Each structure stands twice: as C-alpha cells, then as structure tokens.
Image (cartoon, helix red, strand yellow):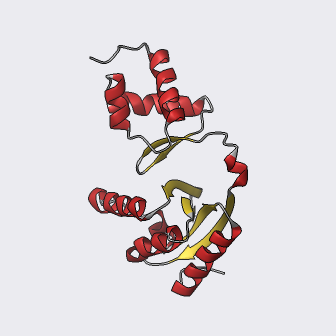
Amino acid sequence: MAKKYSAEERRDYLVSILKEGVKPIKGGELAKLCSVSRQIIVGDITLLKARNHPIIATPNGYLYLKNEENKTKLKNIIIASEHLPEDTERELQLIVDCGVTVKDVKVDHPLYGDLTASIMVSNRSDVRQFIMKLKTTKASLLSQLTNGIHLHTLEAQTDEQLQHAIDSLREAGFLIE
C-alpha cells in the first residue's frame, strides 16, 4: 500500500520524482505512486507550474527541466517548416536521425497569436510514440491551423548536427527559407 500524503507532501514528492527522472513520466504512473487519481496529478502539476517549477507536459508524460549545467553546452535554433500532415513522421525522423531533439512546435494563430506545444522527440522510438498517439487520439496537428506552416525549436550538442538537420529538411522540401 502506497503512503498517504497531504497535498503539499504529495506535490513535494512529485517534484522530487520529476527532478530525479531523465525521461518523461506519465500522469497515470505518478497517480499510482501517490495513490490518487490522474486528475489530482494534473491539478498538482498545474499548481507546481504556477509556482514556477519548470515542468512541461510532453506526449510521453511530464518532464522537469533542470537548470542543467549541460544546457549551456546545448545548441538551439528555431526553424520554419511547411508540409502536409502525412509528412510529419518523415520530418521528425529526418531531424532526429541527425542527433537533434525537436523540443516543440509553434504556430502563429490569427486569434491567439503564438501557440506552442512541447514535442520533445529525440530518436525514432520517440517519433513512433508521437505518431501513434496522434493516430489513437485522432488529434489535429497545430500545423493544420496554419496550412502546414510551423516552427520547431531544435536542440543538439553541436552546430554540425543542427546544420545537418537543416540540410536534410531543405533537401526534403520542408524548410521555409
């Protein structure tokens, strides 16, 4: 039987679990660890975010963004891309095959302005999971709001990896320049 926590103890426990994790953790898993419903976890995570904990929701679960020392070593760029929804998997594979992480997708919505969603895919397995979730949820891609035009924040260890990803996207006809 799991320990019964007060609300504050549970939130502290959630922070410690997420800080120790290196991969996203699903809300359902956190709920089991804390013996509460997934909805309670969603509320706790929302409150923790409001308290400035750098927690993001990815398609694979929650992730605590550490004030990593290695974050300063990572290179980030934003690229503009355009393609049909059925080309999403290919676009993501081209990027991750270069050793690059796709952190997010952003579109310029005519009413709401910038809409950003975390993706956090770093390898083909992550891409497969993302595409499976897209299919099973029958959700729409943000890029469908803007006729396929969108931005991605890309992150890699080296400028060469980022350049290789850009070259691959250009060759595939996805890059907007």
**Quarter holding residue 64:** top right
62 in relation to 100, above or below: above
Number of disc labels: 0
40 in relation to 113, above or below: above
Where is the C terminus found, in terms of image quarters?
bottom right
Q: Residue at x 40, y 30 (%)?
A: 41
128 in relation to 28, above or below: below
Image check: 152 left or right of 177? left
**Quarter holding residue 98:** bottom right
Where is residue 173? Give x, y as percent. Answer: 54, 85
Where is residue 16? Give x, y as percent. Answer: 52, 27
Where is residue 134? Give x, y as percent. Answer: 34, 61
Depth check: 144 or 90 in front? 90
Where is residue 133? Give x, y as percent. Answer: 33, 57
Image check: 88 left or right of 116? left
159 in relation to 122, above or below: below
Image check: 46 left or right of 139? right
